[in-house]
Amino acid sequence: MEMTGAEITVRCLADEGVEHLFGYPGGAVLHIYDELFKQDRVKHILVRHEQAAVHAADGYARSSQRPGVVLVTSGPGATNAVTGIATAYMDSIPMVILTGQVPTHAIGQDAFQEVDAVGITRPCVKHNFLVKDVRDLAATIKKAFYIATTGRPGPVLVDIPKDVTTSRCEYEYPDTVALRSYHPVHKGHSGQIRKALALLLEAKRPMIYTGGGVVLGEASAELAQLVRTLGFPITNTLMGLGGYPASDPQFMGMLGMHGTYEANMAMQHCDVLLAVGARFDDRVIGNPKHFAQEERKIIHLDVDPSSISKRVKVDVPIVGDVKDVIGDMNRLLATMAQKPDEAALAAWWTQIDLWRGRKCLEYDRTSALIKPQMVIETLHRVTGGDAIVTSDVGQHQMWAAQYYGFDKPRRWLNSGGLGTMGVGLPYAMGALLSNPGQTVACVTGEASIQMCIQELSTCKQYRMPVKILNLNNRYMGMVRQWQELFYGNRYAESYMDALPDFVKLAEAYGHVGMRIDKPADIEPAIREAFARKDDLVFMDFITDQTENVFPMIPGGKGLSEMILV
Amino acid sequence: MGRLEANASPESVMKHIISLLLENESGALSRVAGLFSARGYNIESLTVAPTEDPTLSRMTIVTSGSDEVIEQITKQLNKLVDVVKVVDLSEGEHIERELMLVKVRAAGKDREEAKRMADVFRGHIIDVTDKSFTIELTGTGRKLDAFLDAFEEGMVLEVVRTGASGIGRGERILRI
């Protein structure tokens, strides 16, 4: 059947199974919006700023196995989307972003609302396309979904000029895609897998370190089986939390700049390290030279070969789908007579227990001021540890990561790679849409929340009962912490002056606001908020301004050079 | 263009010739060039043109870096969706050629000298005026450097170099 490009665009989304589309209309995409109006298969969520459309779609993807989909207009629509796209790219989140473009004949003429969207986004997408001919439109959209969701996932942008949306051609949505230059690897090399297992079984001080790849690769069950069979300690990166149950005794907590003492010490002093779906980034291992001072064998399993031996030299690389490869490891392990070295392992756990005895996450529970850590622990208790928790970026993000204790994957949504303030509220919106009925909490701070505060309006329109926990210390807390520790207490521009009254602000948007300033009121307030199932509740916790996040590895230092409380 | 990775010690830095086949599509070149600048890799030269298959372009990049950096460069290139194949020609026997056009002063006593130089280096004089010659010369980058060095100061008026193209020796073939 012959259709216009606008009809084709909407039909492609429907045929791809897209249920929710996050967007904001504008001149170049008006034909597409007109087609959206005429159908009911794809539901459009109107945000208040394009950045939030991308973050919401990103949160939708992080909390489900489905890609997030975005539609924005040309020019400022596309540039406003860039922060969201870069955020998703850094954390390998599958997304398809459709941008309007000026008509093909106007491209390059500095037309109204013209911007080179493909050029601007090139460094922060997995791939992007400019569709110049309506006959290429359906196949391009199919390719975009295929590339976004396979291999190491990532955002893919499709730029559609306005005249392409009015041109007509026969519509056919391809079932499959063949790209001669793109072949994601699934199976791991069996020889490498054998080598890895041999190393693991010989290990005296083994350590398993897993990242976002386990969550994205849906490999938690396989990982849990492997870790329990081996009896080894395991740590997760910030992006990997929930990939292994935090309540399990083999779990050592998060590692890295604000990781636990025991996880960082074990990482530094292990003799065999199995890294899965993680990339040894600067926030995880600190200074790579310091990390290299201790001798250890490293096995690195990742779907992206370029993540292997990038920052740290690896002894046994395994390229493949993490679910597939860990599954193979489990099967092979079951057939092997050799078992892990029990005596060595017992000695290693004794050492680990000594490190654990340092109790690095202790804090003053008797303070008359609200300690932010206590808010997170109470949130865990009230939600039974089963909420989807989103965060923004800063101290509150680290406290949520340290104290919530995620037992399941896709329950912890935050901007790990790019560190984008403002993602928390839109992430919560996306998570609610992809997990209807699920409890969703947004842990934020008074600085971050103001970066996408306008979305309180979207939440009202679509009745999104997000529970916002604002850890309000009247500072950009993490900036303040660095200024206290490394800049002689000179708090340059980190004080949040002239803050709004968040209770009134929430009420102005039609929501419920609460202010909590005494430790004794934390739990009753959280209980009341979560009892209001259908309401968005904004809890403004007035917290201790001087509280810092510890442990902390100062910039440029090594894993064992932590500052402790 | 870029600069070397800070951790590469000078003695471990080697010149490499990387050959790629990529989709002959607008934007493919900027993806490759953008990758090098974004990740701080060095480009000494880059040449690209369509192949016998018009949907494919062949690109030769001359770069330098430690083994770790070169490994990352080839991995990152392979990751680009428009890149079909990547090979580091320097890993095996290969042939490298570059074309240069040089305009030299050729008045009075310089005229005979310029002609003799072109002959010695097996160049061709392809344009002549009463004050200048334009010489075409093909060879490795080093040969072209040597040719330019052989002229007296001030004789060379203009230089155009294509950058190196490379191909594997013998049966080594880069195709899909």
Image (tube, rainbow, N blue to C red):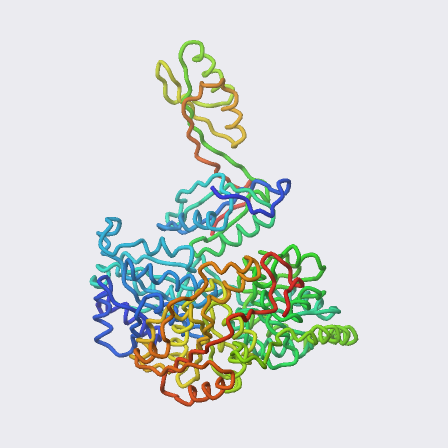
Vertical comparison of A239 with B169: above or below: below
Picture residue at 38% right of the left edge, 57% below the top: A121
Residue A365 in the figure: left or right of residue A539: right
Vertical comparison of A540 with A200: above or below: below
Name the image quarter holding residue A538. Answer: bottom left
Name the image quarter holding residue A88. Answer: bottom left
Q: x, y percentage for residue A60?
A: 40, 74
Q: Is residue A72 visible?
A: yes
Q: x, y percentage for residue A395?
A: 51, 69
- Numbered-mark total: 0
Picture residue at 66% right of the left edge, 76% below the top: A359
Name the quadrant of the N terminus of chain A: bottom left
Name the quadrant of the C terminus of chain A: bottom right
Q: x, y percentage for residue A69?
A: 36, 70
Q: x, y percentage for residue A337?
A: 74, 76
Front in this rendered view, residue A103 or A389: A389
Front in this rendered view, residue A161 or A504: A504
Q: Farthest right residue?
A: A343
Residue A521 in the figure: left or right of residue A133: right
Q: Is residue A64 visible?
A: no
Vertical comparison of B145 with A105: above or below: above
Name the image quarter holding residue A50. Answer: bottom left
Q: Farthest front residue?
A: A368
Front in this rendered view, residue A90 or B88: A90
